[in-house]
Amino acid sequence: MEVRQLGGSGFKVPVLSLGTGTFSSKNSVFGSTGVEEARRLVDISLEAGLNMFDSADIYSDGSAEEILGKAIKGRRDQVIISTKATFRSGPGHNDVGSSRYHLIRACESSLRRLNTDFIDLYQMHGFDALSPVEETLSALDDMVRGGKVRYIGCSNFSGWHLMKSLAVSEKYGLPRYVAHQAYYSLVGRDYEWELMPLALDQRLGTVVWSPLGWARLTGRIRRNQPLPEISRLQSQAIAEAGPPVTDDHVYRIVDAIDEVAKETGKTVPQIAINWLLQRPSVATVIIGARNEDQLRQNLGAVDWNLSVPQVAKLDAASSTTPAYPYWHQRAFADRNPSPIKP
């Protein structure tokens, strides 16, 4: 499997990573993958050259990390672990956020659950506006210097959140975010407006989450058809928590993917993921899998490329008018060129 450099660091990651949101010791809307099945998914991933596994302390209240730790037991040196903290992990006033207090406790807890001495990529799951950026980065600096964390990243930051953090790192000589885990898909291209140019300018590797557009590009959602019985979109709470998108927009994109599928012989998810792998700034795409069949299908998104006309067809079908000031900037594209080359 192809590997890419993670931002401006010297660290290389595979173009596909396996998300562990489905790993759980109890039934959840995202999945209920136990230790044995997780171990099998890790086996298949490693055989394919995928050795990066992404988790978070809040996934299934920590059980996702525990299951991942058991699934990779005896082969820690073969895998890359990325996990996240910031969101609420307990009932206390300080059991949330990116304060020094919470991050140190969260990191120690993740290390224990993962049964490892260090985390390869430790990411802030969201921006905490109540904790000074200096405090957050100073705490992360201690973790890096203490050998508990190798590289740091962030997730779901806005452009100014990210630039402020990078400026503080430069000002005080603190560790720098090398990765930004962001939502990006054919049905959600807002990432391209500001975060993609920022990533290219500041040498940040983008770790893409939900590449299938919050389960809309699984190949089972089409015009004039009911939602599949097993889908996170069947849960109103989950559907409303995801990115808003109109049905017509989804159908227009799926129609275009179906045309490309006839030309390539690939599935809807494979085409959606392959499109992402050809976008600027993308270092790795996190794929999910409830079972072995889903994993093998998603692994089929690599080792081939969509043609230029096929990419153009998908671009046109998924295009939307950006928010201000980005639509205005398109009027003088000679001075604000798009990072995406036609």
Image (cartoon, rainbow, N blue to C red):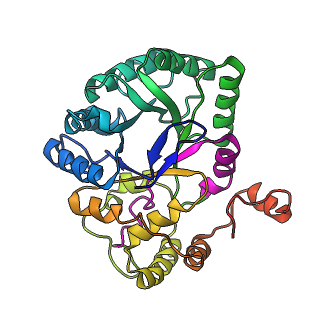
Identified at 57% across, 17% down, the residue is 138
The one of 254 and 142 positioned closer to us in this rendering:
142
* Quadrant assignment, res 323: bottom right
Q: Which residues are magenta?
A: 190-219
Q: Is residue 113 above or below residue 221?
A: above
Can residue 189 be seen in this snapshot? yes
* Residue farthest to the left, as pictured: 36
Residue 34 highlighted magenta (yes or no): no
Q: Residue 149's spot in the image, x, y percent? A: 44, 24
The one of 109 and 309 positioned closer to us in this rendering:
309
Q: Residue 252's spot in the image, x, y percent? A: 52, 78
Image quarter (top left, top right, bottom left or bottom right) of the N terminus = bottom left
Identified at 32% across, 75% down, the residue is 226
Q: Is residue 10 above or below residue 331?
A: above
Residue 199 highlighted magenta (yes or no): yes
**Left or right of 152 on screen, residue 19:** left
Identified at 42% across, 17% down, the residue is 104
**Left or right of 39 on screen, residue 186:** right
Q: Is residue 320 above or below residue 30?
A: below
**Left or right of 334 on screen, residue 320:** left
Could you tell me how many numbered marks the image carries? 0
* Quadrant assignment, res 63: top left
Q: Residue 59's spot in the image, x, y percent? A: 32, 39
Can residue 29 be seen in this snapshot? no
Identified at 54% across, 18% down, the residue is 141
The one of 205 and 236 positioned closer to us in this rendering:
205
Q: Residue 201's spot in the image, x, y percent? A: 71, 44
Image quarter (top left, top right, bottom left or bottom right) of the C terminus = bottom right
Q: Is residue 117 above or below residue 20?
A: above
